[in-house]
């Protein structure tokens, strides 16, 4: 918890207004908050004037086992979550970090459904406007074979960070931020 709060307070302390936008990615125990799946990692990148001004990143010790198949995708294991901050610690801090900023995600519907569920559990309001780079990529590049973050990033940015780190929340949030900036350049 101290490291998460340290990262946020060093980069974004004493803010009286929300960031213009925050790019968010979550890793979860499964595909549906309705089935009881939970957030196990949050990565977020705050942008102002096309520059990264703050980041938020933490694992979350959620009270739900991570299925083997999920661990194979994101590399997060149940053992890694032992001793990590609990949802009751993480989500109020994350709620403060995003404030009223516009939230951007690749497949925003997925990420926002999980955030909404976690905030609802704690009685935290969640009415942020959102933008989705997945939907933008479908509109801009209808002929791509798929619109996965990796595929779109290769097409738009010409490459990817180390493949071993993809599907971790902060790495994916940073990549989505680069994609967002490229897709909105000149607007």
Image (cartoon, rainbow, N blue to C red):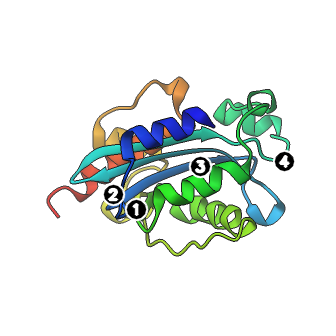
Q: Quadrant of residue 68?
A: top right
- Residue that label 3 marks: 26
Asked if labels 4 and 1 touch by Cβ distance under 8 angstroms, the answer is: no
Which secondary structure lies at badge 2? loop
Front tag of 2 and 4: 4
Tell me what residue is drawn at x 64 percent, y 67 percent.
116
SS state under label 3: strand
User: Can you identify the residue that label 1 sits on?
Assistant: 138
Question: What is the CA distance from the residue labelled 1 to the residue labelled 4?
Answer: 35 Å
Q: Earlier in the sequence, mark 2 or mark 3?
A: 3
Front label number (1 vs 3): 3
CA gap, disc 2 and disc 3: 25 Å
Q: Nearer the viewer, residue 179 or 11?
A: 11
Q: CA distance from mark 4 to mark 3?
A: 16 Å
Look at the picture and state if 46 lies above or below 186: above
- Number of labels in the image equals 4
Query: Which residue is identified by label 2?
Result: 141
Of residues 161 and 116, the one drawn nearer to the viewer in this rendering: 116
Q: Residue at x 82, y 59 (%)?
A: 36
The quadrant the C terminus occupies is bottom left
Badge 1 marks a residue whose secondary structure is: helix
Question: Could you tell me if the residues under marks 1 and 2 are in contact, i.e. CB atoms within 8 Å?
Answer: yes
Q: CA distance from mark 1 to mark 2?
A: 5 Å
Q: Residue sitting at 41 percent across and 28 percent down?
A: 161
Residue 63: numbered disc: 4
Quarter of the image with the N terminus is top right
Distance, label 1 to label 3, CA atoms, is: 21 Å
């Amino acid at each position: 918890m101290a490291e998460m709060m340290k990262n946020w307070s060093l980069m974004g302390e004493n803010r009286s207004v929300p960031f213009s936008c925050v790019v968010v990615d979550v890793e979860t125990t499964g595909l549906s908050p309705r089935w009881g799946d939970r957030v196990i990692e949050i990565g977020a990148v705050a942008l102002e004037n096309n520059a990264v001004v703050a980041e938020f990143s933490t694992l979350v010790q959620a009270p739900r086992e991570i299925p083997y198949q999920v661990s194979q995708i994101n590399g997060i294991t149940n053992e890694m979550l032992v001793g990590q901050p609990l949802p009751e610690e993480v989500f109020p801090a994350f709620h403060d970090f995003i404030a009223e900023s516009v939230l951007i995600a690749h497949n925003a519907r997925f990420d926002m459904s999980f955030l909404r569920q976690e905030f609802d559990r704690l009685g935290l309001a969640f009415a942020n406007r959102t933008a989705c780079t997945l939907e933008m990529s479908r509109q801009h590049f209808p002929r791509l074979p798929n619109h996965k973050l990796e595929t779109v990033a290769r097409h738009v940015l010409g490459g990817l960070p180390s493949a071993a780190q993809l599907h971790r929340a902060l790495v994916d949030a940073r990549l989505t931020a680069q994609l967002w900036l490229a897709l909105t350049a000149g607007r």
